[in-house]
Image (cartoon, rainbow, N blue to C red):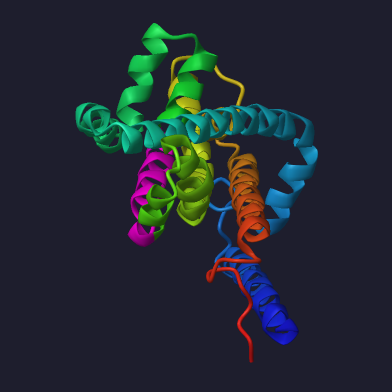
Amino acid sequence: MKESGLVRTVLPVLLLAGAIAAWDMAVRVFAIPPYVLPGPGLVAGALIGDRGLLFDSLVVTLTLAIEGFALAAIGGIFWAVVFNQWRVVEYSFYPYAVVLQVTPVVAIAPLLLIYLPQHLAVLACAWIVAFFPVLANTTLGLRSVDRNLVALFALYKASRWQVLVRLMLPAALPQILAGLRIAGGLSLIGAVVAEIAAGSAGAGSGLAYRIAESGYRLNIPRMFAALLLLSLAGVAIFAVLSALSHLVLRRWHESEVKEER
């Protein structure tokens, strides 16, 4: 298992190193100007030289993404439980949740910026894209509970609340955590889209705004540096949520239990 873990870590690192080397070689061999494609050295220089500006913007974007994710997690799980307990509510509201999901957030963002302050508009966009995966996965998990166990709880005269808390929610945990992993990355995407829309309206301070601003100024190395920070932020969010899922499920669920050899 240790060897397998080492291979899974080393191979992506080697692939990344090869890609950076190929990128640097292509820039040097074809003499590509920095305003078209900067080399890795220039991007690293922009990352260091503009670190204050970029990291301040990263904090703004990450804060909004985390706030949107938290609201989506609470709202998605709450409404999934409500839908599970009262089907008439599900039949009434679920179609509108689907409408919210299928409407592109890039089209909603400019509208929200008209009616809401910028912070709330960006937060709403992050929430919109992250809400549905939590709702859909939690709903699926609650519906997938073993019917024999539900019948057993009914046989022992368990209340509706006891069935929900002691059986349905624990059984739905794998699906809930899977939904949270998806929602974590989507909340960052929603915040970025809204920040770009806010930036085009002449306001903004997040990392996506810095990318747009750098593009207007043809500061391409700083664009790449900001994009790199965004990618690392998305990877960090996914890694944290994956670690949380592993900690919760490692002792009892097949997806996380180590295979015996």
Residue 21 shows in this picture: yes
Q: Is 56 contained in the magenta span?
A: no
Viewer-nearest residue: 144 or 247: 144
Residue displayed at 58% across by 62% down? 31
- Note whether 253 is above or below 64 in the view shown: below
Position in image of residue 90 (x %, y %) = 26, 32
Viewer-nearest residue: 143 or 260: 143
Q: In this view, does 207 lie above or below 165?
A: above
Residue at 60% across / 66% down in the picture?
A: 252
Q: Give the range drawn in magenta.
A: 129-148
Furthest toward the front, the residue is: 156
Does 194 sit above or below residue 24?
A: above
The picture places residue 24, in percent across and down from the top left corner, at 64, 65
Left or right side of 51 for 223: left
Q: Which residue is drawn at 52% across and 28% down?
A: 71
Does the magenta-highlighted stretch encompass residue 139? Answer: yes
Quarter of the image for residue 152 reads bottom left
